[in-house]
Amino acid sequence: MTDDAYVARGRRALVVGLGCIDRGDDAIGPVVAARVDAAVTASGLAGVRVIVHEDPTALVEEMADSEVTVIVDAMRSGAPAGTVTLHEAGRDEPALSARTSTGPAGTHGLGLAAAIELARALDRLPARVVVVGIEAVDFEHGHALSVPVKDAVPRAVEAILGVLGAGPVSS
Amino acid sequence: MTSGSQVLSVEMLARVEGEGGMHVHVQDGEVQDVELRIFEPPRFFEAFLRGRAYTEPPDITARICGICPVAYQMSACLAIEDACGVTVPEEIRYLRRLLYCGEWIESHALHIFFLHAPDLLGYDGAIEMARDHRELVELALRMKRAGNDLMTAVGGRAVHPVNVRIGGFHRLPSHDELAELRPQLVAAREEAIAAVAIVSGFEFPDFEQPYLYLSLNSENGYPMESGSLVTTAGLSAPVRDFGEHVIERHVAHSNALHSSFDDQIYVVGPLARYSLNFPALSPLARECAEAGGLGPTCRNPFQSIVVRTVELIHALDEAIRLIDGWHGAPVAAVAVPARAGVGHGATEAPRGLLYHRYRIDDEGTILDAQIVPPTAQNQPAIEADLKAFVQDNLHLSHEELTLQCELAIRTYDPCISCATHFLNLEVEHL
């Protein structure tokens, strides 16, 4: 499916860059989201909203109006640094907690997986949710992106644009 | 480990963000030490601010916490304006208070219903609670939305508001923009009033803290965006005296600095604020406090959920009052020319008093910065609470004791590491 076909179907898509720009590789979500935003604007692709957030709890409401949500975040799974992984987590997918831990949520809010599962429990999860995880290594305050994570940016952007152009047809 | 000793270590506290951990050392049935390991972002930001322009702290320090950016912005503004000898006009203070209401509403709703209520109802978290008490979670989301929308209207956006500057705001909201929020806030207030009956019906452990309480006290009502220092020991002092009473010291087990007030353990946050400012609550909030079984003071940290609900009602009530009274201002901001000096600022973040101090030169370059967040101030009290609590509950299983300790820690709503989110992924190969 091309971008034109995507737009023709009038789908509403949300891209969320999750993370803190001051904490090393945790900035990867916002960095990739900014690149996606620029690419979407340049291509004239309609119906795509790109936001940056630090609080996954906000996603419960932010996702509700979209048909496709793509969340890009730093990840730790033991894979080599910079590995880009896509996880389908939409309405008809198995609960994330069955496949992953829910992550260390805070006393302030929920972790990403918990926010997705809360949206599922409240029937607010979009038909398609894709979590784009980028394997990270350094979360120190004040550090820049590590080299392997920085090198992963183009691959993550390409993966997200692919999702936006090839989402399932809404009925 | 010596004979007769036992070590309980919880490396990663569930639902505590970042890298928190707890270590308890028990010797012959006696709790010897409790260490809560937390890692605080303000240390990095203090260093980062040195050499920056005096206009930058509101934007830079807002990045310390994704949940309470307004608190950091407000304390930073007050401290810089104090250093420069500027007092903002009443209309600016008024709007700052309204912005702060939005943050309190959002933060308290989240903590009450997503984090504390599941503990007290016996659920692992909000997801599990949502299956049986969907209406509570929906209610929390509506309240959070009300707070978000208020922060967006006044602050420009809900996360890291961009409309705040030294001396005031970049742009003033119109009366009509704010009036649009009124129905949503009134509905949220009604729901918060109804929630008092729910949260006050929980069973709370019988536990009282003996510590000194510290909060702001303000002639403008229940303390939020300004005030002077007051304690349960009867002290009343201007914010610039904070450093004469509060000493921060390094401890080996945590990168957070531990604070003491006149060499005593002390507590900041909802319980301190409530106990030192009960008469300043709105009549409706006081009425709800009484309906929820609270007296004019509260020293049981487990009841903080009731106090937060009362403060939530107050914040909603106050937001409505402020919106009704908003008639604009002659200017969005006043000039704050740089001058060499030291400035102090303190406001009441949802989780407690937040103090900033800056020293700037005559060109406005920041020479040094000090940020004392609520969590650092409460950490010795949390550890002391845990020591007593664990001692009284050593008969519990490791799992149950861990759960109870987590619950005790969460009552303080500590900001352990505000802004790191990553998915801990476990891939199962079939």
Image (spheres, rainbow, N blue to C red):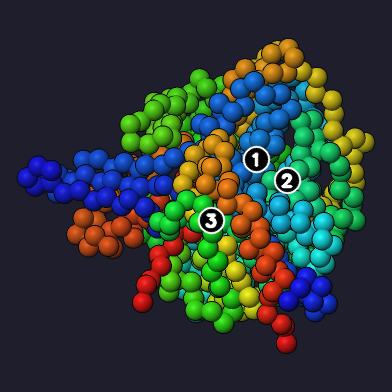
Quick check: B299 above or below A162? above
Q: Label 2 sits on what residue type? A: Pro
| Mark-to-mark CA distance, 3 and 1 | 26 Å
- Tell me whether circle 3 and circle 1 mark residues in contact (CB < 8 Å): no
Q: Is residue B134 left or right of residue B29?
A: right
The answer to whether residue A14 of the structure is visible from this angle is yes
N-term mark: 2 or 1: 1
Q: Nearer the viewer, mark 3 or mark 2?
A: 3
Tag 2 and tag 1 share a subunit: yes
Residue closest to the far bottom: A171
Residue closest to the far right: B330
User: On the image, numbered disc 3 is attached to which residue?
Assistant: A134
Q: Label 1 sits on what residue type? A: Ala
Quick check: A152 above or below B138? above
User: On the image, numbered disc 2 is attached to which residue?
Assistant: B161
Q: Is residue A19 left or right of residue B184?
A: left
Local crowd size for mark 1, using a 10 Å CA cut-off: few (<14), some (14–19), many (≥20): many
User: On the image, numbered disc 1 is attached to which residue?
Assistant: B62
| Mark-to-mark CA distance, 3 and 2 | 28 Å
The answer to whether residue B270 of the structure is visible from this angle is no
Label 1's element?
Answer: helix
The chain holding disc 1 is B
Judging depth in this view, the residue of B409 and B360 nearest the camera is B360
The chain holding disc 2 is B
Image quadrant where one finds the N terminus of chain B: top left
Q: Residue B362: name its quadrant.
A: top right
Q: Is residue A53 left or right of residue B351?
A: right
Q: Position of residue B289 (x, y in %)?
A: 57, 58
